[in-house]
Amino acid sequence: MLASRPVRNEAVQWERDENGEVCITLVRARTWKAALLSKIFYIPERRKLVLDEVGSGVWEMCDGQTSVEAMIRGLSAQYKLNPKESEISLLHYLRQLGQKRLVGFLVEKERVPRKGKKR
């Protein structure tokens, strides 16, 4: 997990507001279930998710180039945290972003020798 590189979902619309915070616009899914539930309950077509200073910084680092390990080191240095505290908090936050399908994780493919045929 520490070697993986988080990458933002390209389908997600986001921007920085005047305070420097990241605002993510979430659009309601266009499925029959969502349509049915929206007739029963009020479900807005769009809603905004505003990230705080730390969350915005993490979001910016989710560029597909920065590893989780480098993110931990950066957060530890910037906010003067113990590396273990940074690791636990960051992994929890990235897990939440992943569950909401806002980020994905790039993992390097390891070369595994093939068994069987010898050349």
Image (cartoon, rainbow, N blue to C red):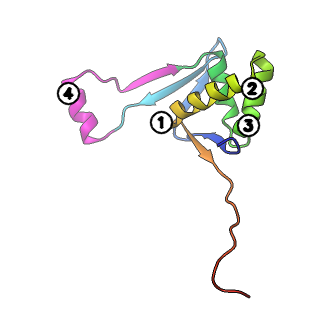
C-alpha span from label 3 to label 4: 45 Å
Residue farthest to the bottom, as pictured? 119
Q: Nearer the viewer, residue 116 or 40?
A: 116
- Badge 3 vs badge 1, beta-carbon distance below 8 Å: no
Nearer to us of marks 3 and 1 is: 3
> Is the C-beta separation of discs 3 and 4 under 8 Å?
no
Mark in the foreground, 3 or 4: 3
Image quadrant where one finds the C terminus: bottom right
**Residue drawn at (70%, 32%) of the image:** 61
- Relative to the observer, which residue lies in front, 93 or 57? 93
Residue 83 bears which disc, if any? 2
C-alpha gap between disc 3 and disc 1? 20 Å
Pointers 1 and 4 in contact (C-beta within 8 Å): no
What segment is highlighted magenta in the picture? 30-49
Which label is found at residue 99?
A: 1
> To which residue does mark 4 refer?
39
Q: Which residue is mark 3?
A: 69
| Location of residue 92 by image quarter | top right
CA gap, disc 1 and disc 2: 24 Å
Which residue occupies the extreme top position in the image?
19
User: In the image shown, does 99 or 115 lie closer to the viewer?
Assistant: 115
Q: Amino acid at mark 2?
A: Pro
Earlier in the chain: of badge 1 and badge 4, it is 4
Which SS class for mark 1?
A: helix
Q: Secondary structure at mark 3?
A: helix
- What residue sits 63% from the left and 83% below the top? 116
